[in-house]
Image (tube, rainbow, N blue to C red):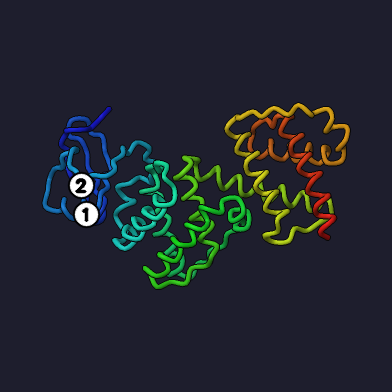
Amino acid sequence: MSIDHRLLRVDRIIGNNIVMASSEATGVEYVLLGKGLGFAAKNLQQLDTADERIEKRFRLEDREQLMNHPTFFEDMDAPVMDVSDRIIQRIEQTFPERLNDKIYLALPSHIQFTVYRMRHEIEIMNPFLQETQLCFPQEYEVALDALQMICEAFHLDIPEDEAGFLTYHIHSAVTHVPLGQLVKMSSLLGKLQQMIEQEHHMTFRQGSMNQVRLMIHLRFALERIVHGSLVDNPLIQQIRDQYATEYALASRMKKVIEQELKLTVPEDEVCFLAMHLYRLFRTYNKDS
């Protein structure tokens, strides 16, 4: 239901650019965003939804996912909201797609917790940093800029591992893929790479072309599987016969994927993976 041309009660000023408001008629709660909106609303009891200062607005519907927002905002530092706003602007400059509204709450929450951990000397470690960097290079570059902003804003020396976590937030906001799914896929990518290395007695050189190509192939394969995007492989029988060793490994990888994602991996994808493994092993052997 559109909320245009209605008056909303100002419930809380979150920062200079963010206001929480609600409809007295329906009880529906909203987050309103706009440059200077919070500052302008400090002396107001109501805001007109047609106010030109409101650049974005969205409903608060999922209280669990939005961290039970009334208590969530209680201790939110103003500098956190400020740096979050600047990071989101940086994301919008890089990705023209409409961002998932949840980033306006998820990102400051994450930054607040990161700052807390650093100030209390709680180590930040990201076991999937390598996979994240290879699979989401554009998002990772933005995440590095965001990390620098946070370090400068709070005078902290935050490890690069944090850029991997910020990458998840950025990619989730751009693609509308849940954060939990991204973390699960990153973990799975690491397992699949390790499986290839162990079974073929090889070790990928960090950032090598072979590793990059493998991560990209697996990333898009997993995304197709998750989204049910079927691809047709007309050479299934030929691949099974000619690349029997690679097909056997791809079939074992299929079982791991299905176990992790609780989804069925189409035979077409298994054979495409076998073809990629064949090219990978030939290239790797030449380079070795």
238 vs 106: above or below: above
Secondary structure at numbered mark 2: loop
Q: Is residue 83 above or below residue 226?
A: below
Q: Nearer the viewer, residue 120 or 187?
A: 187
Asked whether the residues under the numbered discs 2 and 1 touch, taking CB atoms below 8 Å apart as contact, a structural biologist would say yes
Mark 1 residue type? Gly
Q: For the N terminus, which image quadrant?
A: top left
Q: Amino acid at mark 2?
A: Arg
The spot of residue 112 in percent (x, y) is: 39, 59
Which of 10 and 104 lies nearest the eye of the viewer? 104
Q: Residue at x 65, y 39 (%)?
A: 221
Q: Nearer the viewer, residue 92 or 17?
A: 92
User: Relative to 241, is 44 on the left or the right?
Assistant: left
Which residue is found at the position 87% from the left and 41% from the top? 245
At 52% from the left edge and 56% from the top edge, which residue is drawn?
140
Query: Can you identify the residue that label 2 sits on?
Result: 53
In percent of width and height, residue 230 lies at 64, 28
Residue 111 located left or right of residue 227: left
Q: Secondary structure at mark 1?
A: loop
Front residue of 234/71: it is: 234
Residue on which the image places disc 1: 36
Q: Is residue 65 visible?
A: no
Percent position of residue 80, x then y? 34, 60
